[in-house]
Amino acid sequence: MLKEFREFAIKGNVVDMAVGIIIGAAFGRIVTSLVNDVIMPPIGLLIGKMDFSSLFINLSGTSFPSLADARKAGAAVVAYGSFLNTVLDFVVVALVIFLLVKQVNRLRREPAAAPAEPISKDCPYCLSVIPIKATRCAHCTAQLGAA
């Protein structure tokens, strides 16, 4: 059983999958940083110097100056700013993956096959379809000459 497990774990597909998962997790952190640290601050500035991650709706009825204070007090809140950041994370990751897959598929495409050599032609006398190598038409018996 140990030998079978080792063969399974060492197979190329399993190792490739593990590498993909590790790189994907690291890429996710990069995209999260891109969204939170690069994309959202200018958007917040354009909207009025607001930090999206601090946007929330307080459901408890008590007033809190920040989301951190509301959570510290245990108040029921809807943290829609964090949700917006997460949605933007997803959109950026999906866009990058789409572009990557599109590029890989473009590189993998096989060149278009050359047009096949014709296997038939029309008889110039009766316009019947005959084999390309025919020297006499099977329909009108006309002599066609060498192909």
Image (cartoon, rainbow, N blue to C red):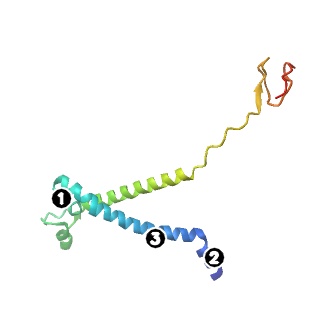
Where's residue 41, x and y in %? 23, 59
Residue most extreme to the front: 146
Where's residue 134, x and y in %? 84, 28
101 with respect to 66 (left or right): right
Name the kind of residue labelled 1 in the image: Met
Element assignment for label 2: helix
13 with respect to 147 (left or right): left
Callout 3–callout 1 Cβ contact below 8 Å: no
Q: Residue at x 18, y 68 (%)?
A: 70
State the image quarter where residue 141 is shown. Answer: top right
Callout 2–callout 3 Cβ contact below 8 Å: no
Measure how far apart labels 2 and 3 are at the Cα level: 21 Å
Element assignment for label 1: loop
Name the kind of residue labelled 2 in the image: Glu
Element assignment for label 3: helix
* Earlier residue among tags 2 and 1: 2
Q: Quickly name the residue at label 2.
A: 7
Q: Residue at x 19, y 52 (%)?
A: 46
Position of the C terminus, as image quadrant, is: top right
Q: Quickly name the residue at label 3.
A: 22
Where's residue 100, x and y in %? 46, 56
Where's residue 102, x and y in %? 48, 51
